[in-house]
């Protein structure tokens, strides 16, 4: 508004001057208003900015001043051409009015023998204003602005007299000498700053790692060192000897940036240090089955403050990443941002955990959790079949196992099968109710949507002989291996060697079946011993084990090996932010979702030998304009033809011609629209259509012979809404049962 006013006031004065026949005054008024607008542009414009206020302002004023001075001796054609280009580029920007007025002045001066005072300077100032006020949509705005100003400077220099050139050279020499002197003085004062900033960054990284891994003593020492290093850097950058450099364009930006980041990082280390000083993350490790809830509560505010400090520092780093940074500093900022991103994510997760942990541990009222152990060797949409389960009770921070059992117990106990009801979300009921999950717990996890399965389990468990639960957890063999990173090796009487994070996936996925075969009683004894022992160890945890389990637990969460659900919205929201809900991705106005979900249809353990890859190809029907999405998955069965127990290799209801090792799967394609065709290795197959959450589902029964592969293709057709294709998100393929998160 101020820029427009500076230009628009001029015409009113111009009209008055013309009415009084003061033409020279009129031209000077217009020229003065253009110069005023150019100066305001330099002072107020956010364009051509390095995000450093003082040096930016000085830099823009210098550019406008140099362009105005050079315009005195620049050629008419060069000046007019540059102003025309500048006006076209800056028309929608803050310098648009000044550039347009300067174009009018330059055009009016063409062919005049006697030049009006200040007119050419005003035209040059208009070019400078346009250069520093280019709109953001102009590609490479800093470079374009530099070219505009450089053209005027070169033309002005070539059009000047020898005396004027000498004067310019002397001014440049004096200015250069002054800058050199200031640079030498500042370099002496700042010689240790790069080392201090590197040391501070390393200290922050090590300190955050110490906090994450329950090593507060090391974290405190590292953060103390980081705080001291950042303090030295901040003091050096704020020295009076360095102050003049802040007024130099580009140079001043780097000085201010260094001081700003040193200050922000110092605040971060102070906040993180409070976590190390006032609280010990080791309080999260239970002793005697109990976690000190008062200590958890006390730790929460410090962790949240440290998390906010990380976010604030990251914001300052991101604001500083612009076109003006020299490459070494840009690379250092990128490394710092990566460090802060990782540390911030860990602190965020810890802060969220601390926020809900007291309630989950029964701080105000007893809480109960159902924990189902799933095995992806018999694959299900949400990982694997539920084999064993345990029930946990928490009261005032004390946790105990109140029940341990098998899926067969849940099928047989509680209400008779014909009296059980399935209370499920509509999509779950439509797609999976036909497989009888209310009477056959092995089918509860057919759906790939964690919240839907959690609701079903919470409703069915009391009907199956259990008590009402407040939390549902599903832990597959990979997640159990990650828990063994916490407990250390676990020895049980029924197995010849201790189970570790390295061998648990293989033992639970295939070796137990090879060892025990159809001896269900022996296998049940082994699994009961294992789950009981693991939880006993988890309830008496060594704090140092937290550090060892971080990598495995992280991968287990990322690959949906661990799923949590709570009926309480505030707890479910925290689980969602932690990424442990196992929720099915949903389409939106900007995003399309597609992918494949597998379910074992043979009642065997052949998924240990299975792998699959999925791809989605999109297109459109030129005749109808319909959108097409072709979802293709390649299923590979590496099971041997012989040598496997029947419990592992045989499929029930396999049909004629089926042999041991041949696998049967329900292959479900999720996408948008009706499936017009489904093929298995080029042969059409029937499909069942349904809808789950916001996605259409097509399910086909597919057989994959041992030692062979099958390519399954589904083609979705949907009506076009006239918009461009949305961004595609591919559902994450279920991980092979044999792939360990802890190797």
Image: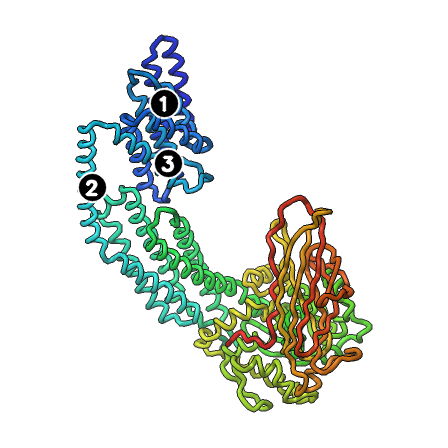
To which quarter of the image does residue 592 belong?
A: bottom right
Where residue 521 appears, x then y in whole percent? 69, 88
Q: Distance from label 3 to label 1 (Cα)? A: 20 Å
Mark earlier in primary sequence (3, 1): 1
Mark earlier in primary sequence (2, 3): 3
Asked if residue 728 is positioned above or below residue 487 in the image, the reply reads above
Circle 1 packing at 10 Å, graded few (<14), some (14-19), many (20+), is many
Where residue 466 appears, x then y in whole percent? 70, 75
Spot the residue most to the top. 20
The answer to which of 118 and 503 lies nearer the viewer is 118
- Mark 2 — residue? 176
The answer to which of 566 and 153 lies nearer the viewer is 153
Would you say the residues marked 1 and 2 are in contact, meaning their CB atoms lie under 8 Å apart? no
Residue 306 in view: yes
- Mark 1 — residue? 106
Q: Distance from label 1 to label 2 (Cα)? A: 33 Å
Where residue 296 appears, x then y in whole percent? 48, 67
- Between disc 3 and disc 1, the foreground one is 1
Secondary element under disc 1, as helix, strand or loop, is helix
Where residue 13 appears, x then y in whole percent? 38, 16
Q: How is the image coloured?
A: rainbow
Mark number, residue 132: 3
The answer to which of 499 and 628 lies nearer the viewer is 628
Would you say the residues marked 2 and 3 are in contact, meaning their CB atoms lie under 8 Å apart? no
User: Is residue 603 toward the left or the right of residue 224 in the image?
Assistant: right
- Between disc 1 and disc 2, the foreground one is 1
Mark earlier in primary sequence (1, 2): 1
Secondary element under disc 2, as helix, strand or loop, is helix
Circle 3 packing at 10 Å, graded few (<14), some (14-19), many (20+), is many
To which quarter of the image does residue 34 belong?
A: top left
User: Is residue 510 toward the left or the right of residue 207 in the image?
Assistant: right
Residue shown at 17% from the left, 35% from the top: 170
């Amino acid at each position: 508004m101020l820029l427009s006013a500076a230009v628009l006031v001029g015409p009113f004065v111009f009209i008055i001057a013309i009415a009084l026949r003061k033409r020279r005054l009129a031209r000077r008024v217009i020229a003065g208003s253009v110069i005023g607008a150019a100066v305001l542009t330099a002072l107020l414009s956010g364009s051509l900015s390095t995000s450093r206020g003082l040096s930016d302002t000085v830099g823009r004023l210098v550019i406008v001043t140099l362009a105005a001075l050079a315009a005195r001796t620049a050629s008419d054609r060069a000046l007019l051409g540059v102003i025309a280009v500048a006006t076209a580029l800056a028309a929608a920007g803050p310098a648009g009015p000044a550039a347009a007025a300067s174009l009018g002045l330059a055009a009016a001066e063409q062919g005049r023998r006697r030049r009006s005072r200040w007119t050419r300077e005003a035209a040059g100032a208009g070019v400078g204003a346009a250069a520093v006020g280019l709109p953001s949509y102009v590609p490479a705005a800093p470079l374009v602005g530099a070219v505009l100003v450089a053209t005027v400077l070169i033309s002005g220099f070539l059009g000047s007299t020898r005396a004027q050139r000498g004067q310019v050279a002397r001014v440049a020499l004096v200015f250069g000498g002054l800058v050199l002197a200031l640079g030498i003085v500042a370099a002496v004062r700042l010689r240790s700053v790069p080392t201090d900033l590197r040391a501070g960054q390393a200290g922050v990284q090590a300190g955050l790692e110490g906090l994450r891994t329950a090593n507060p003593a090391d974290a405190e020492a590292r953060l103390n060192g980081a705080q001291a290093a950042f303090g030295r850097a901040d003091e050096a950058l704020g020295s009076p000897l360095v102050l003049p450099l802040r007024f130099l364009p580009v140079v001043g930006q780097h000085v201010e940036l260094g001081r700003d980041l040193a200050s922000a990082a110092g605040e971060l280390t102070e906040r993180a240090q409070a976590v190390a000083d006032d609280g010990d993350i080791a309080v999260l490790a239970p002793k005697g089955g109990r976690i000190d809830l008062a200590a958890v509560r006390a730790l929460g505010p410090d962790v949240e403050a440290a998390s906010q400090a990380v976010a604030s520092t990251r914001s300052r780093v991101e604001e500083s990443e612009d076109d003006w940074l020299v490459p070494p500093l840009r690379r250092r900022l990128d490394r710092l941002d990566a460090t802060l991103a990782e540390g911030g994510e860990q602190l965020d997760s810890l802060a969220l955990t601390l926020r809900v942990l007291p309630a989950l541990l029964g701080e105000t009222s007893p809480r109960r959790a159902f924990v189902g152990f799933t095995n992806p060797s018999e694959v299900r949409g949400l990982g694997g079949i539920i084999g064993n389960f345990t029930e946990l009770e928490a009261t005032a921070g004390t946790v105990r196992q109140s029940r341990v059992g098998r899926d067969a117990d849940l099928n047989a106990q509680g209400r008779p099968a014909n009296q059980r009801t399935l209370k499920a979300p509509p999509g779950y009921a439509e797609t999976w109710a036909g497989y009888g999950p209310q009477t056959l717990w092995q089918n509860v996890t057919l759906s790939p949507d964690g919240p839907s399965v959690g609701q079903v389990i919470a409703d069915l468990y009391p009907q199956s002989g259990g008590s009402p639960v407040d939390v549902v957890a599903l832990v597959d063999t990979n997640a159990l291996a990650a828990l063994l990173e916490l407990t250390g090796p676990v020895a049980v009487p029924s197995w010849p060697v201790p189970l570790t994070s390295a061998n648990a996936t293989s033992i639970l996925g295939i070796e137990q079946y090879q060892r025990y075969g159809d001896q269900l009683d022996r296998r049940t004894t082994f699994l009961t011993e294992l789950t009981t022992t693991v939880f006993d160890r988890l309830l008496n945890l060594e704090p140092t084990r937290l550090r060892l389990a971080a990598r495995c637990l992280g991968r287990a969460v990322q690959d949906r090996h661990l799923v949590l659900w709570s009926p309480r919205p505030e707890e479910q929201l925290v689980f969602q932010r932690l990424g442990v809900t196992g929720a099915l991705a949903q389409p939106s106005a900007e995003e399309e979702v597609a992918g494949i979900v597998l379910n074992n249809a043979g009642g065997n353990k052949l998924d240990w030998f299975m792998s699959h890859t999925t791809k989605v190809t999109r297109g459109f029907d030129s005749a109808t304009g319909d959108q097409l999405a072709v979802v293709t998955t390649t299923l590979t069965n590496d099971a041997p033809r012989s040598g496997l127990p029947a419990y592992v290799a045989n499929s029930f209801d396999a049909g004629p011609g089926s042999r041991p090792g041949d696998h049967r799967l329900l292959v479900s394609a999720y996408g948008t629209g009706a499936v017009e065709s489904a093929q298995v290795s080029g042969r059409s197959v029937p499909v069942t259509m349904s809808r789950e959450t916001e996605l259409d589902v097509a399910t086909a029964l597919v057989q994959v012979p041992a030692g062979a592969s099958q390519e399954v293709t589904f083609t979705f057709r949907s009506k076009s809404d006239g918009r461009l294709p949305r961004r595609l998100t591919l559902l994450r393929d279920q991980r092979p049962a044999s792939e360990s998160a802890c190797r």
